[in-house]
Amino acid sequence: MPKAAVKPKKVRMRKPAGEGVIEEAPITVSVNGKSYTLSVEPRLLLVELLREQLDLTGTHVGCDTTYCGACTVLMDGKAVKSCTLLAVQADGAKIMTVEGLAKNSELHPIQKAFGECYGLQCGYCTPGLMMSTYQLLSSNPDPDEAQIRKAIAGNTCRCTGYQNIFKAIQAAAQKAKGV
Ligand code: FES
Ligand code: FES
């Protein structure tokens, strides 16, 4: 997975009454088509921004160490692990989370396929897997098994044994060519 470039940020200092100095940086980010202008601490992780400030809790945190892929979102169309990126690195970017898949209360074909093929059990890994699937099918609408395995190599599932996940991704490809 390509590493996102770190953009230098202007940092402004804020000093709340009675507390130490907190450094913050302004960012503008589009999430699921909605633009947000925010002031964030430079240490804030992208996943923390999504979950704790934007209340988009579909993106999960499993390991916090870039291993499990539960936190996978799309940044400018590429699957990234949002526990490994700072929010300031998303400045100017378009982020898509699992909440961005469904449209007008209609589940996305990928979501339908995971449900119909029993591609999940506890569901903790599922949002990340669906975002990796979205990236795969966006560039390769008819992937073979090797390509599917490679696309989800960064997503760990501790429940399913993966077979139904492969079936779900193949079914999603049939349902939605070129999502
Ligand atoms: Fe990000 Fe596990 S929480 S890779
Ligand atoms: Fe439980 Fe994948 S369904 S971790």
Image (cartoon, grey):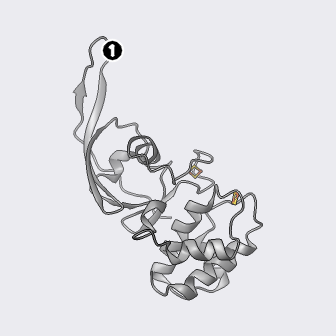
Counting from the top left corner in percent of width and height, residue 40 is at: 32, 38
| SS at circle 1 | loop
Would you call the spot at circle 1 few (<14 residues within 10 Å), some (14-19), or many (20 or more)?
few
In the depicted structure, whether residue 24 falls above or below residue 14: below
Q: In this view, does 124 lie to the left or right of 10?
A: right
**Residue 14 sits in which quadrant?**
top left
Question: Can residue 149 be seen at all in this image of the molecule?
Answer: no
Please name the residue shown 61% across and 78% down the image: 169
Please state, as top left, top right, bottom left or bottom right, where the C terminus lies in the image: bottom left
Q: Name the residue under label 1.
A: 19
Q: Which one is in front, 134 or 79? A: 134
Total label count?
Answer: 1
Amino acid type of disc 1?
Answer: Glu
Question: Can residue 9 be seen at all in this image of the molecule?
Answer: yes
Counting from the top left corner in percent of width and height, residue 77 is at: 40, 69
The response on whether ligand 1 sits within 8 Å of label 1 is no
Please name the residue shown 39% across and 41% down the image: 53
Please name the residue shown 63% across and 72% down the image: 114
Please name the residue shown 51% across and 64% down the image: 1
Counting from the top left corner in percent of width and height, residue 4 is at: 40, 58
Counting from the top left corner in percent of width and height, residue 30 is at: 30, 58
Q: Which one is in front, 124 or 154? A: 124
Farthest residue in the top direction? 18
In the depicted structure, whether residue 107 falls above or below residue 177: above
